Amino acid sequence: MSIRLLPPEVVAQIAAGEVIERPASVVKELVENALDAGARSISISIEAAGRERIQVVDDGAGIPADEIALAVTRHATSKLARPEDLFRISSLGFRGEALASIGAVSRLTITSKVAGAAGGARIRVEGGRAGKVERVGAPVGTAVRVENLFYNVPARLKFLKADITERRAIDTLITRYALAYPQVRFRLSEGERITFQTAGDGDRRAILAALYGVETAKQLLELQAEEESIRVRGFISPSSLTRSNRKEITFFINGRWVQDVPLTSVLLQAYHTLLMVGRYPLAALFIEIAPQEVDVNVHPAKAEVRFRNAERVLGFVQRAVRRALLAYAPLPAVPASVWGARPPAANLDWQVAHAEAARATEASPAAGPEEAGLNPPWPTAPRLPLLRLVGQIGAAYLVAEGPDGLYLIDQHAAHERVLFEKLMIQHAMRNVLSQALLTPAVVQLPPAGARLLSEQLPALQRLGFEVEEFGANTFQVRAVPSLFANGDPSLALHAIVEDFEEDERPLQDEIEKRLAARVCKRLAVRAGQTLSPEEQRALLSDLERCESPRTCPHGRPTMIHLSVEVLERQFGRRGAR
Ligand code: ADP
Ligand code: MG
C-alpha cells in the first residue's frame, strides 16, 4: 500500500479518541469548560447513562455569538495566547480540542449568551460537520447538549461498559468535582431523578456527608498545610476508617482531578503500618501549587501531570498527612462495658475537643498568614512516656505504670510492632542482618502460594531471607533475619503467602513492608507465653523506642491506657458524672 494522508474525518476521529473515551469523558470536558467560564451553578442531566444524551447547563461567562463557530473548531481556545503560557496554565482547558472532538463523534448543540448581548447564539455539529450559527433567545451562560454519542463510531460504542458502570463513572466524576469546588452548585440528574446535588455554599463537610453518610463524614480528619508556593488541604480518614480498595483516594492539583500514582503511594506510606493489610484510607486532597511548577500538558485527557520538583511535592504531602494522622491518633478508648454505666470517654472528649478547636481556628479570621505550616496547630504527637514495669498477667499482658496512669500492653501486638520496626530500620539502611541456618529448612507450599513466593524471592532477600526454589512447590531456606533466628522458617514462609491479594499491585516498597509485617505477626511472642522479667522489661523498653508504639503493624492497638483521672473518677475521688 502506498503512503497517503489520512482523510480529515479519520484524523478527527483519531484525535477525538484520545479525549473522548466514554460518556464520563464528555461530562468531564463540559464541566471543566463551565468551571473555566466561572460558573456558580452547573447542572448536568443524562439519559441512558449518557449514551443517548448528556446536557450541561452553566451560568458562566458564555460564548460571544461571533466566536461560537470557532469554539467547535479544533485547536481553537480562548485560554492560551502565547507559547510561554503553556507552562503556567491556570485554566482546566487549554488544548482547544474538547468541543471539536465531541462534535466529531456525536450530535452536538451549543447554545450560549454573554452578559450584555442582545441575544444568544446556537450552533449544531453532527459527526464533525458544523451547521450555521442561529440567533436564539437564551439566558446568560452556556448549554451544551450531546446526543447519540459515538453514533458514527460503532467500534467505540461496543467498548462501552454496562450502563451501571458508565453511570458510576459519571457519578464519581461529578462528586469529585463537587468536592473540589464547594462554592459551585452542582446538580446531576438522570431522567426526572436528581441523583446528586450540592448547595454551593463552600461547605465541604456537607458534601462529604452526602457522599459517604454523616457518620463517616464526621470521622474524616481535616488537614491543611502550607509552605512556600505549595499548599495542601482536604480530608483523610483516620486509620480506623478504611476501604478495601483505593477508589476513595482522590487528588486535585490546582483544581484539576489527576490520577497520580506517586501521590497515592506517598499517601499510603504516610499511613505506614497504621492500616491493616489490604485496607486503604479515604482521602480527598487538594493541592495548590504555582502553575509554573507543574506541567499539565502530558496527556490529551489531562489526567496526569508532572511536577518540576516531584520529590518536594511528594515529601510535602506525605509529611502533612503523617502529621495530621499522628496528631489525631487517639489511644484506643476503654470499652464502655469495662466501666458499667459510667464510661470514661476521656479519649473521645479529647478528640471532639480538638476537632472543635480545629473548626474554631479555621472559622476565625485571626488565623493569619504567620500561622504557616499546620493550621490548626495540632498537639505534637505523643509517643510513649517512660514506663515502669509492674508485671505480666494472664501470660498475655504486661502491666506498666507511667506518669499519667496505668498501661495494659498486649505482649503479642507489642512484640509484633517492635520486630517490625527493627526490621524496617535495617531494611531502610539496606543492611538487614541475617543468620544462616545450620541445617537449611525445606518448606513445601500449596501451588498458588509457591507461585506467589517465587515472585517475591528478591523482596524476601532484601528482608534478610535467603530462600531458593528446591523442586516443585518446594523451597529451601538457608538464612533468616537475625531478629527471627529462633523462629520457625516454615511459619514465616506460610505467613508470607497467606491472603496475599493477587489483584493488588502495590509498589515494591509497600510489598516489602507488608511481607515484613506478616512475618513479624507470625513470629512474635504469643499470648499464653510466659515471659521472664528480663524479657518483659526488654519488650517494654523496645516498645518505648518505637516510632508508632500504640498500634501493631496491622493497625490493632498494642495497649490500653487508664489515665489517673479515669481511675480517680472510677473510685469516686473526683466529681463523678
Ligand atoms: P478549551 O477548553 O481547551 O479551550 P474546548 O474545545 O473545550 O477547548 O472549548 C473551546 C472554547 O470554547 C473555550 O476556550 C471557551 O472559550 C469556549 N467555551 C467552551 N465551553 C464554554 C462554556 N461552558 N462557557 C464559556 N465558554 C466556553
Ligand atoms: Mg475545554
Image: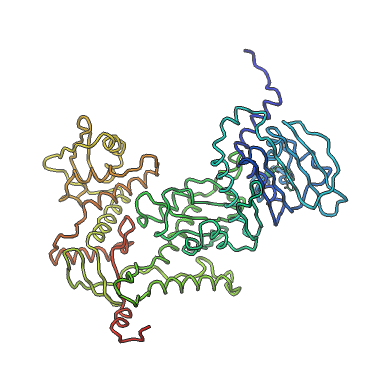
Horizontally, is 376 left or right of 93 in the view?
Answer: left
Q: Percent x, y for residue 315?
A: 46, 54
Q: Nearer the viewer, residue 467 or 526?
A: 526
Q: Which of 287 and 211 is in front in this view?
A: 211
Q: Percent x, y for residue 114?
A: 81, 51
Horizontally, is 140 left or right of 542 in the view?
Answer: right
Q: Percent x, y for residue 267?
A: 45, 53
* Residue found at the far right of this picture: 118
Report whether residue 233 is seen: no
Q: Which of 174 and 563 is in front in this view?
A: 174
Q: Residue at x 19, y 36 (%)?
A: 444
Q: Residue at x 48, y 57 (%)?
A: 316
User: Coloured how?
Assistant: rainbow
Image quadrant containing the C terminus: bottom left
In the displayed structure, would residue 173 be above or below residue 226? Answer: above
Image quadrant containing the N terminus: top right
In the displayed structure, would residue 357 be above or below residue 115? Answer: below
Report whether residue 433 is seen: yes
* Quarter of the displayed picture in which ligand 2 can be seen: top right
Q: Residue at x 66, y 49 (%)?
A: 192
Q: Percent x, y for residue 416?
A: 25, 56
